[in-house]
Amino acid sequence: MKYKSVFDIIGPVMVGPSSSHTAGAVRIGLVARKLFGRKPTWARISFYGSFAETYRGHGTDVAIVAGLLGFDTFDERLPNALEIARAEGVDVSFSAEEAIPHHPNTARLRIGDDEGELELVGISIGGGKIEIVELNGFALKLSGHHPALLIMHNDRYGTIGAVASVLAKQKINIGHMEVSRKEKGKEALMAIEVDQPLTDDLIQELEQLPNIIQVAKLAD
Amino acid sequence: MFRNVAELVALAEKDSIKIAEVMIRQEVEVSGRSREEVIAQMDHHLAVMERAVERGLEGVVSRSGLTGGDAVRMQRYIEGGRFLSGETILDAVSKAMATNEVNAAMGVICATPTAGAAGVVPGTLFAVKEKLRPTRMEMIEFLFTAGAFGYIVANNASISGAAGGCQAEVGSAAGMAAAALVELAGGTPAQAAEAMAIALKNMLGLVCDPVAGLVEVPCVKRNAMGAANAMIAADMALAGIKSRIPCDEVIEAMYRIGAAMPVALKETAQGGLAATPTGRAIAARIFGASAASK
């Protein structure tokens, strides 16, 4: 079941005009912001499919930037997100891509600052719900509706087990987990959705495990 | 957990409870939150809907200037007393448009099941309020009932115009509203399912063809007619009229039609009303000639 809650149907409370093209877009931007962990100084946003055709009419561009600024779907500052970003020194640009995406409402976000970069592909599947399908080149599936961890690590035996053990010790239940890698023995990614909130202590403990490169928290 | 309308109706009948109650119990179980919290959140969503209707009835205009003011126009016409259909149904039409006019103006609304279709459910609810005099809890239950049917459509078909056309948005909303109206008026769970089936059947094939890609034309008026459709479907079901095609099969048909629908008619602003000479001229006026020639 893609939709689990009645509030996916009677909701979200949001600034109009489109749940998939405005509220969903805000949430894609918010996920990127949370994964990046801070406000980016630049953002390159590419739209595909229906997003590419209608993003200006639906305020999809404004909505993604609102998410990058940390605004939620019902934030009344949302319509002014582009002006606010400019005032705060965030350089944003948009492009409409011709390529036919797997899902009609697809956005690719590249964001960054002097310290680093992040690239993410999100899809808006209707009613304001989203999925994150790609992060830094890795394919994945995150609903964005549960606390989640993204762990970049070296592809070595025992690493996944060690992470799971830390979670088990803290009584954190894994609801969904994916592992992927670009090449055997090289950089790999764990995407883990859990049922309980994730504390900073837990993140630190995970970061100290062998073969862990980076841990990002994605609170709900 | 119910997966389809047949299971939802069976659950309600087994315990002799409302569909709203089935939905509340499931939400408590799935979310792990308390019953009070779940009801309080729906109460908040109801309040957002109420404010959106009020704001729309005060009169709003969208940034493009394409929509706004029709909700008010309809209220004045009702006051004139020379209408052809009926006062309650026209009130539903007006309040559905009020909500969507606020949505188009980038105001705060509650998506039901989407923002583009947000007018139908509150429009019908606030229109029958005077006649049925529901308690606050009954109004909250109306939203849970509508949500239960929408949940089934979302999981078995689609509630996205980009994936299934307007039938998936205003069509789903009309079905949800029809079912909730039946329950609020004292009909049985089975009658609610009939109302959903009748309403949705009459929305099948409806394309999503927003002029200039804006959720304005024809969305505001499609919400108006979705609300009218829901009211009639509810009355038909309450009269004992049944759908020959079961509700779950209507939902399945809607899904298949959506999959077969060309991309030009699924929220891409490339076909239908968006591709008419006037539709293109509006797009050119708002975005410039390059956007309109696509």
Image (tube, helix red, strand yellow):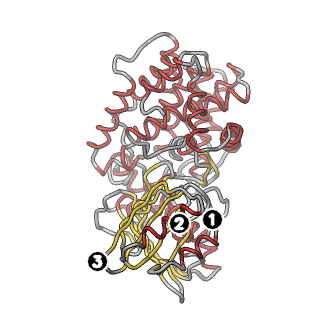
CB under 8 Å between discs 3 and 1 = no
Q: What amino acid is at disc 1?
A: Phe
Q: CA distance from mark 1 to mark 2?
A: 11 Å
Q: CA distance from mark 3 to mark 1?
A: 37 Å
Q: Is residue A23 visible?
A: no
Q: How many angstroms separate mark 2 from mark 3 (CA)? A: 26 Å
Residue at the disc numbered 3: A183
Residue B45 is at least partly visible in this image: yes
In the image as oriented, which residue stretches furthest toward the top? B240
Q: Are marks 2 and 3 on the same chain?
A: yes
Labels 1, 2: front one? 2
Q: Is residue A166 above or below residue B3?
A: below
Compare marks 2 and 3 and give the one earlier in the sequence: 2
Residue A108 appears left or right of B122:
left
Q: Nearer the viewer, mark 2 or mark 3?
A: 3
Q: Reading the chain from its start, which is encountered first: label 3 or label 1?
A: 1
Mark 3, residues whose alpha carbon is within 10 Å: few (<14), some, or many (≥20)?
Answer: few
Q: Position of residue A34 (x, y in %)?
A: 57, 70
Q: Dot 2 corresponds to which residue?
A: A31
Whether A119 is drawn above or below B180: the answer is below
